[in-house]
Image (cartoon, rainbow, N blue to C red):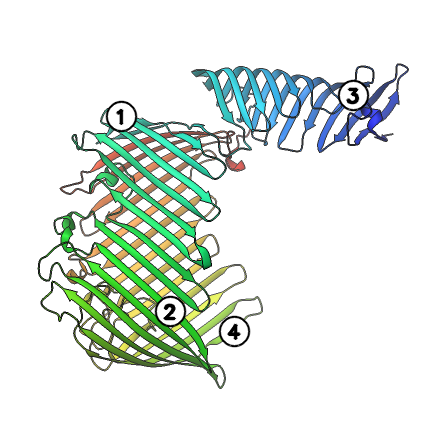
Amino acid sequence: MRALALWLLLCLAPAGALAQTATLLADSVRIANDNRLIAEGNVQVAYQGALLTASRIVYDRSADRLLIDGPITLDDGQNSVLLADSAALDPDLSNGILRSARLVLDRQLQLAATQIARVGERYVQLSNTVASSCEVCAANPTPVWEIRAAKVIHDRQERLLYFDRATFRLFGVPVAYFPRLRLADPTRSRVTGVLIPRLRSNSQLGLGAKVPLFVTAGDNADLTLTPYLSNRTTTLETRYRQTLSFGAINVAGAVSRDDIRRDATRWYVIGDAAFALPRDYRLEFDVEAVSDEAYLVDYDYSDKDRLRTEGRILKVSRDKLFRASLTDYTTLREGEVAIEDRLPSLVTDLVLERRYRIGPGELRLGLDAASIYRASDIDQLGRDTAEIGLNADWFNRDILGPGLVWQNRARLAGTFYAVEQDSRFDATPMRLAGTLATELRLPLQRTGAAGTHHLIEPVVQLAYTRQSGDTVPNEDSQLVEFDEGNLYALSRFPGDDAIETGLRANVGISYTGYNTDGTGIGLTFGRILRTEAVKAFFPGTGLAGDRSDWLLAGRLSFGAMLDLTARSVFNAGFDTKKTETRLALRTDRFGLEGAYVWLDGERRENRPRDTHELILDGDLRLSRHWIGSFESRYDFNRDQAAEAGVGLVYRTECIEVEFSVNRRFTETALIEPTTSLGVQVSLAGFGSGRNDESYRKICKG
């Protein structure tokens, strides 16, 4: 019969030594003639959040010592568990010796030792230690990796492990020796130190290694310095991150000396920052700068071909909007570098908007101002512009009869321009435009017995726009998209410099269906009918003429497993002008993300040739521990791949080894085709890294 005893302070320790009560649970508890307390059979002691289990405990009151027979388990309730055959501990369990013991941290890292000494609440010292997070099987007792050390000290307060005379072994073979080694335990995600190196071979940069050094700067900031050394380059990569009470900073960069450009120092900086200002304003920065057009591609840092550096102040509330920005653009495109001084480089923008509830409707008043600067002084090609405009929008919505939604809208906008270095325009042109629109929607919905919801919504919108005044330069509406987002817009132009005019009818129908399990489908079909053609739209947009092309857009979703979106613009003869499909598929063993794009060539949109590309990125779990991956971008017009890559990952509960091969086929006067090979090894069990339990090794036999 089990006996339960609640022993107060004087039963487990000298009076006044402890401030809490311990609970003892055992099959039998007795006091021997020599005043020793003996508990035997399934013994459990709970004290200050720690739980000790053993087969037998003897408390020697005269020596103030616990003598414990195993198997022993001591769980401190803080992701640390001690296992031992025998132990001699103080009554508060904070000091003492455990023999033939193991320390398990966060259920990941195991440290086996001939002896473990607990020194106060902070330190645990292990002698003749083997550390590993790998599963060890009886048939194969050698772990994939292990660290053997003469002594290990675990600092529980700092959550650090200090190894003395440590040897790192792979499959039992010593591969590295460290006189002193410090590592973070599994419960600590950030600590200053050297991260695992990565090998990289590049056809332009040669064979090299990256050795990251991670430096913490308090709880809210860190710096990563990564020397990249090979026989053809000497590079230092950096990344700085900081979180503030009023904002955040994230900046990455690198500086290089290499054989590609022998006499040049190459560098890049890409970063962003955001700060909260008084009265709910925000200050934000985006920085993108590079030394030359090919540096980002040569080192696989980014595939950006235009860089933007911007500073902005904004404030957004329920009835107010304020945004002011200053932006600098830099092109990296080979065809644009030669005419860089003719492209917009410095752009300023200001937007103010406020809305008011007036009777049954809503009034929005806005002010916008912008300027564009080009470095060139050539007439027309070096045009500089500035504009300021005022606009007022009013709209209301009513429900008529059995659910017919009637919406009316009116807009009046006036804009004043200042134009320099372009003789085609007046120096100070002005424009006034007004729009009236009315719209009818008939939402038809039905909910099935199983919770399936269906919504069909036909829409007819009539709009009329007229403008008067001077001809103004078009700076912000050169690239036009026709999609489900602007089918019922008053103007399909993205900016303010161009306005869609005349009488037109925007007609369409949409269907939405979704289930309670997250699966759903959405479809939109429509076009635009006009009384006269709008010459400002280019044929390649699908919006030219008195009738636009047909728009068909849809989305299919099966929860987290599948997300498919597609959009196509085609004429009455089903000749496609634009089509785009995006796919994201994820199962337990397979993942695929892809995009297919077809765009008719349109020289006036800086697209002289048709664009016909397929982009795929996928991974397949080949077995319990092996994962294959691939990525590709194929140009059907050139009938060749633009990029391709394959990867193979070996992953267990304790290690991850990644092999990758990538080929970039792009070739220009500035960029050469390159092939890159990479090898990276990650160990689970240190820091916060933990692999999925499905990758854990299974012992057989």
Residue that label 3 marks: 56
Identity, as a three-letter code, of the amino acid under mark 1: Ser
Mark 1 or mark 3: which is in front? 1
Residue that label 4 marks: 446
Residue that label 1 marks: 230
Identity, as a three-letter code, of the amino acid under mark 4: Arg
Q: Earlier in the sequence, mark 3 or mark 2?
A: 3
Distance between the Cα atoms at labels 3 and 4?
69 Å
Q: Tag 1, which secondary structure? A: strand
Q: Residue furthest bottom?
A: 401
Residue that label 2 marks: 353
Residue drawn at (27%, 39%) of the image:
268
Mark 4 or mark 2: which is in front? 2
Q: Tag 3, which secondary structure? A: strand
Q: Is residue 510 above or below residue 324?
A: below
Identity, as a three-letter code, of the amino acid under mark 2: Glu
Q: Earlier in the sequence, mark 4 or mark 2?
A: 2
Q: Percent position (x, y) of residue 544?
A: 21, 72
Q: Tag 4, which secondary structure? A: strand
Q: Would you call the spot at circle 1 few (<14 residues within 10 Å), some (14-19), or many (20 or more)? A: some
In the image: residue 245, left or right of residue 250: right
Q: Would you call the spot at circle 4 few (<14 residues within 10 Å), some (14-19), or many (20 or more)? A: few
Mark number, residue 590: none
Q: Earlier in the sequence, mark 2 or mark 1?
A: 1
Mark 3 or mark 2: which is in front? 2
Distance between the Cα atoms at labels 4 and 2?
38 Å
